Image (spheres, rainbow, N blue to C red):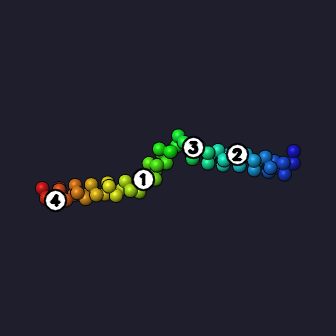
Amino acid sequence: MDINELRGVHTLVLMAVFIGIIWWAFSAHRKKANEEAAHLPFDDDEVEKRTLEQEKTEKKQ
């Protein structure tokens, strides 16, 4: 086995790993986790609003 065959095998292994990661990331059982991750930027706004409301009520008391 020379270096070129080793490079070819290495390329095929890396391609298989890449395809496996893509398959895992977009598989049906990951849909809920992907949707939750997609809404994370919007969830922060709700937390910020609640924090501001709590600070306002604490200042009034």
Q: Identify the image quadrant of residue 54.
A: bottom left
Which residue is labeled 1 in the image?
A: 39
Q: Residues within 10 Å of mark 1 (few under 14, many from 20)?
A: few
Quadrant into which the C terminus falls: bottom left
> For the residue labelled by badge 2, is the local secondary structure a helix, a strand or a loop?
helix
Mark-to-mark CA distance, 4 and 2: 59 Å
Locate residue 14, reporting x and y percent.
Answer: 71, 48
Residue in the foreground of this view, choosing between 50 and 35: 35
Amino acid type of disc 3? Ser
Mark-to-mark CA distance, 1 and 4: 31 Å
Q: Identify the image quadrant of residue 55.
A: bottom left
> For the residue labelled by badge 1, is the local secondary structure a helix, a strand or a loop?
loop
Which residue is labeled 2 in the image?
A: 16
Q: Residues within 10 Å of mark 2 (few under 14, many from 20)?
A: few
The residue shown at (52%, 43%) is: 30
Quadrant into which the N terminus falls: top right
Q: Is residue 58 left or right of residue 43?
A: left
Amino acid type of disc 2? Ala
Q: Is residue 8 above or below residue 45?
A: above
Which residue is labeled 3 in the image?
A: 27
- Which marked residue is nearer to the observer: mark 4 or mark 2? 2
Q: Is residue 20 left or right of residue 10?
A: left
Locate residue 7, reporting x and y percent.
Answer: 80, 51
Amino acid type of disc 4? Lys
- Which marked residue is nearer to the observer: mark 3 or mark 2? 3
Residue in the foreground of this view, choosing between 61 and 34: 34
Mark-to-mark CA distance, 1 and 3: 19 Å
Q: Are marks 1 and 3 in contact (CB under 8 Å)?
A: no
Locate residue 39, reporting x and y percent.
Answer: 42, 53
The residue shown at (47%, 44%) is: 32
The residue shown at (46%, 49%) is: 35
